[in-house]
Amino acid sequence: MTAKIFDQNTMPFLESLIAEKHRSQTSFHMPGHKGTLPPHPLLLEFLGGNVHPADLVEINGIIDYLHSPKGALLEAQQLAAQAYGADVTFFLINGSTVGNVAAVMSCARDGDKVIMPRASHRSVYGGVVLSGATPVYVPPIYQPEVGFPLATDTKIVEKLLAENSGVTAIHITSPNYYGYMSDTATIADMAHAHHAAMLVDEAHGSHLHFHAGLPQSATQLGTDMVIQSTHKTQSALTQASMLHCNDNGNINIARVGQMLALLQSSSPSSPLLASLDAARMLMATQGHDMLDKPLQLAHAARDAIRQLPGLWCYGDDLVGSYGIYTFDPMKLVIRVSDMGYSGFVFYDKLRDEHGIDGEFADLKHVIFSVTIGDTEQSIHKLLTALKAIAAEKPAERAQIPEVPLPTELPKMALSPRDAYFAQSKIVPLAQSIGEICAENIIPYPPGIPLIVPGEIIEKPYLDYLAFIRSQGGGVVGPEDKTLATVRVVAK
Ligand SMILES: Cc1ncc(COP(=O)(O)O)c(C=O)c1O
């Protein structure tokens, strides 16, 4: 094999960013500011056209310090707590990712049980590995039309609580990536009746608290911790997020701060933190007005898309089954498979032929995130593109495979932490049956861990992996990206 030649004069990442900037795509994905919403004038004044002078750091107590805030940052976090309906707010510079890890670590020690949906974000798994908690999974019950578990069913949580002693926390995701939400208030009551803390990954719901036409934020539903990616649906810079705590006596808020100090950089970025302050100010002072129009546009778009031949936009039609309690109308989940397109092909068509980027695609759908960054023009552009595609006859109808989902979760032989840190070895994937997996194996779609560290590899899971890959799906998690081999616990 010839060695790759590196040209130290190139800046491939920076160059790819500049190329993308010049394409001027219309965005229906994160971040919420979409690159078109101007920063708040004060933030603009601060950043100017020159980021370097704005990249200030804590020095001699002049700039307040995230890990021991005493002045401006303390006040900014207090303002955020009030604005988002919490008692205490922590600013995060490593996304909801660090929020989820810290939330789990602050509530669970080695061997404690944490109830969590199998379809949780990988950061929740990170919290489980780092804390040593034993996960008790809410199994993925796939909503048949969408092909993904959309919410956490209260009855299943009740059953798991009855079957398991020593549960110290319940961690759910609501809304999920598709905008569907669980009955968080009921699950919080159940958690507290069992002296467990109620943690909610609201990464996709930081805007919810600011408009009565949206479902209530989990901060208002009797929960203990709520983690929000302020960058996903508001105007904060990418990574800038918040962790809100309610002081209900179920969590140790000081310990949450300690965990964040352990996990986050000791050089927090001022621009990120400043963008949180500005995002909060905007939402607190003008949130309703800023959300009102995009919300109306999202409702109108949903109705319009439902009239287009071959397309369907989900909404309240899914509420009331599969644990779905409500939904965020600002997510447009469009089924394109009736037209014969896979979500991936449709996504690429929108991007390449119409200059529109969706949030993400799966086998049958393309998902669009409408935010305060949207206008009549952006929604008009989306609808015009959808109409144009709906009017076309696809040259060749794609075959959308039905994925034979595994019916049972693998058996857990070790806790994820024990497996993750155990002595391990690499074996060929084909010879791994019966071994204890030491890494995550997450097929995309649907992005739900198939096997996590500590679980026993069985043939049906390997068959499923082979099927997903034969359909062009990817797998993330394993060290060996080709998946010819897998890391297992050395016995
Ligand atoms: C449900 C959910 N939780 C957490 C995260 C992590 O959020 P962040 O990107 O802010 O770290 C994501 C990211 O996509 C997510 O979808």
Image (cartoon, rainbow, N blue to C red):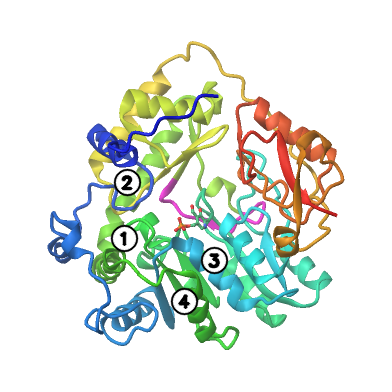
Q: Position of residue 229 (x, y in %)?
A: 42, 61
Q: Position of residue 339 (x, y in %)?
A: 52, 22
| Closer to us: 47 or 31 | 47
Q: Amino acid at mark 4?
A: Ala
> Measuring 54% from the left and 60% from the top, which residue is drawn there?
174
Whether 325 is among the magenta residues is yes
To which residue does mark 3 refer?
100
Residue 400 is left or right of residue 74, and the answer is right
Q: Can you tell which mark lies on residue 326?
A: none
Q: What's drawn in magenta, residue-wise? A: 320-331
Real-space Cα separation, disc 3 to disc 4, in angstroms:
14 Å
Q: Is residue 217 visible?
A: no
Marks 4 and 1, the one that precedes in the sequence: 1
At mark 1, the secondary structure is loop
Marks 2 and 3, the one that precedes in the sequence: 3
To which residue does mark 2 refer?
297
Residue 310 is left or right of residue 475, and the answer is left
Mark 2 is surrounded, within 10 Å at the Cα level, by few (under 14), some (14 to 19) or many (20 or more) other residues, namely: many
Mark 1 is surrounded, within 10 Å at the Cα level, by few (under 14), some (14 to 19) or many (20 or more) other residues, namely: many
